[in-house]
Amino acid sequence: MNVDLNSRYGLNPAHSEVVEACKIIEPCDALDMGCSNGRNAVYLSQLEFNVAAIDHNPSAIDMLQSITAQEGIDNIKAQVYDINKASLEQDFGFISCTVTLMFLDPARVDAVIADMQKRTVAGGYNLIVCAMDTEEHPCPVRFPFTLAAGQLRDAYEGWELIKYNEDVGTMHNGAKLQFATMLARKAG
């Protein structure tokens, strides 16, 4: 496994929660929602996941397609897709949605989560990391969407929560930001 592909192409390392989740999730059909230029998709492909990588940004998808072509990576399928549509066309064992929901149309987030759940195979996993806006920790960034306390946990009622927290972290610019982080397993 060539672990420095991300640095070779100037990609950030895979999200730490994706790395953690892969310690318990066996390679399967995976979806990287809001993949940007592919930091998580490239990481997952190196662990032998079959990755569908989607993003609304054509230049990010072009960059990821260029990387896969140059490296001969055949287990990433990258395509431009508007996540707000909430109409995934296949089922996955692992759907990763890290720091993506907060950029979606707030009126579509419930539908997007419901579609993720519907398109997860029995025994499969959803990973979500999303900014929050609470009374104790108002979000300092004007994202289109933020989660309220408990909102993500409530959306996954009936799923096994492998990991769930609503922790405050410090962004690279020093701003304090609260995130909901969840890894959940679908019954099956």
Image (spheres, helix red, strand yellow):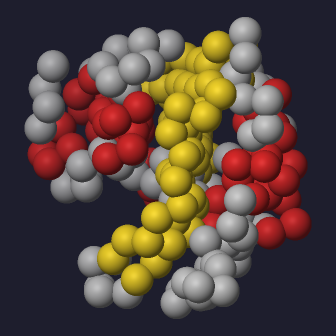
Q: Residue drawn at (39%, 44%), measured in percent from left and top? A: 17
Q: Position of residue 86 (x, y in %)?
A: 81, 45
Dividing the picture into quarters, in which one does residue 29 lie?
top right
Q: Residue drawn at (65%, 59%), measured in percent from left and top? A: 101
167 lies above or below 73: below
Q: Residue drawn at (66%, 86%), measured in percent from left and top? A: 135
Residue 23 left/right relative to 85: left
Q: Position of residue 171 (x, y in %)?
A: 34, 77
Closest to the observer, 144 or 166: 166
**Residue 88 in sight here:** no
Q: Position of residue 126 (x, y in %)?
A: 61, 34
Report the label total: 0
Dividing the picture into quarters, in which one does residue 38 lie?
top left
Q: Position of residue 148 (x, y in %)?
A: 72, 70
65 lies above or below 2: below
Closest to the observer, 163 or 144: 163
173 lies above or below 42: below
Query: Which quadrant, please, contains the N terminus?
Result: top left
Residue 106 left/right relative to 129: right
